């Protein structure tokens, strides 16, 4: 028992240490779902074949990785009373995707108020402005080259917009969404939209982490300046909830996951089956908000799926 008390915290600490500092370890940390599936398979095989050492080894793997799935639980309990709600959608359309009608159909089906678009090209930008006339309030920085065009389309007025670079050449958006109500004061939400680089080598890993730190610091500075306005972040963060860098970003920004139920549903697919995908697209919200509904969109020509969350202030 004493050995277990010493060993288990260490078994969790050392993988987290390496994942925070080495890009290959971080990539493996993002594959915890797949590692757990393998671990369970090996455990069952070990028990069936009475290979006790193999079974014990698989238990070690499961003990290391399973606790991270607490991040798949909603961060706050659902409240019986919530204020006026707003629906927001984040969609990485894939810059090379020309199936615009499928993208637009997915957005219409989301029945949303605000859309954050990643990998936005000028052609798609024009198409969205034309085919989604209800979204009259727009701020975009579309790009033909690269995969980092970005835009926000809203049914509600946008104010105090800001385009900023955390890493050279990659722009993010910060903007205030003004929800006007007929018989009540307007509600305000500060929206951040960002898309860091994929951490496919040591340099990209460092740049992704630098962008996450900068965005989190900007969120914290805005909160200090305008504490009455709740903050929402949408984007393809190129990391899963199982990465120590995701925990780092949450702690630094003060935001929590915007999900309404336990979910392991994938938003990016290497191949369109569950074990071969990752949760890379995220909505994070102020702890004062509550997510009353969360859903992942259908295939629309991209390797990503849209995410839509319904959020409201909690009474």
Image: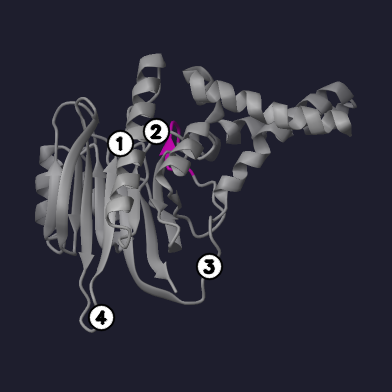
**What span is in magenta?**
266-271
Quadrant of the image occupied by residue 4: top right
Q: Residue at x 20, y 72 (%)?
A: 180
What residue does disc 3 label?
78
Q: Secondary structure at mark 1?
A: loop
Specify how the rendered protein is coloured. one colour
Badge 2 is on which residue? 238
Between disc 2 and disc 1, whose residue precedes? 1
Is residue 240 at all visible to an observer of this figure?
no
Neighbourhood count class around disc 3 (C-alpha, 10 Å): few under 14, some 14–19, many 20 upward: some
Label 4 SS: loop
Q: CA distance from mark 2 to mark 1?
A: 8 Å
Q: How many C-alpha atoms fall within 10 Å of the one at disc 2: few (<14), some, or many (≥20)? A: many
User: Element type at marker 2?
Assistant: loop
Q: Is residue 289 left or right of residue 12?
A: left
Quadrant (top left, top right, bottom left, bottom right) of the N terminus: top right
Badge 3 marks a residue whose secondary structure is loop
Q: Between residues 22 and 146, which one lies in front from this camera angle?
A: 22
Give the quarter of the figure containing the C terminus.
bottom left
Mark 1 or 4, nearer chain start:
4
Task: Report the front residue among 16 and 44.
Answer: 16
What secondary structure is the magenta-colored segment mainly?
loop
Instruction: Decide which of tag 3 and tag 2 comes sooner along the chain.
Output: 3
Magenta stretch containing residue 269, yes or no?
A: yes
User: Which quarter of the picture shows residue 74?
Assistant: bottom right
First in sequence, mark 4 or 2: give its number: 4
- Label 2 with label 1: CB-CB less than 8 Å: yes
Residue matched to label 1: 195
CA gap, disc 3 and disc 2: 28 Å
Query: Residue at label 4?
Result: 184
What residue is shown at x 64% (from left), y 23% (from top)?
A: 14
């Amino acid at each position: 028992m004493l050995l277990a008390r010493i060993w288990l915290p260490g078994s969790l600490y050392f993988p987290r240490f390496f994942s925070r500092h080495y890009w290959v370890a971080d990539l493996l940390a993002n594959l915890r779902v797949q590692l757990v599936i393998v671990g369970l398979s090996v455990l069952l095989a070990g028990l069936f074949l009475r290979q006790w050492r193999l079974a014990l080894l698989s238990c070690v793997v499961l003990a290391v990785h399973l606790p991270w799935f607490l991040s798949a639980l909603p961060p706050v309990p659902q409240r019986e009373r919530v204020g006026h709600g707003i629906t927001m959608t984040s969609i990485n359309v894939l810059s090379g995707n020309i199936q615009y009608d499928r993208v637009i159909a997915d957005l219409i089906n989301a029945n949303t108020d605000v859309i954050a678009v990643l990998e936005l090209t000028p052609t798609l930008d024009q198409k969205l402005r034309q085919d989604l006339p209800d979204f009259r309030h727009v701020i975009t920085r579309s790009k033909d080259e690269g995969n980092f065009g970005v835009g926000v389309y809203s049914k509600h007025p946008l104010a105090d917009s800001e385009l900023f670079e955390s890493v050279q050449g990659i722009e993010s958006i910060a903007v205030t969404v003004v929800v006007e109500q007929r018989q009540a004061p307007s509600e305000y939400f500060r929206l951040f939209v960002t898309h860091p680089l994929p951490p496919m080598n040591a340099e990209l890993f460092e740049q992704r982490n630098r962008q996450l730190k900068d965005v989190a610091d900007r969120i914290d500075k805005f909160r200090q300046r305008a504490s009455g306005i709740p903050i929402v972040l949408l984007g393809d963060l190129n990391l899963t909830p199982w990465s120590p860098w995701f925990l780092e970003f949450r702690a630094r920004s003060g935001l929590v996951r915007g999900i309404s139920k336990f979910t392991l549903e994938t938003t990016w697919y290497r191949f369109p089956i569950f074990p071969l995908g990752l949760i890379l697209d995220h909505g994070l919200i102020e702890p004062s908000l509550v997510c009353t509904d969360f859903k992942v969109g259908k295939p629309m020509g991209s390797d990503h799926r849209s995410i839509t969350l319904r959020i409201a202030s909690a009474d």
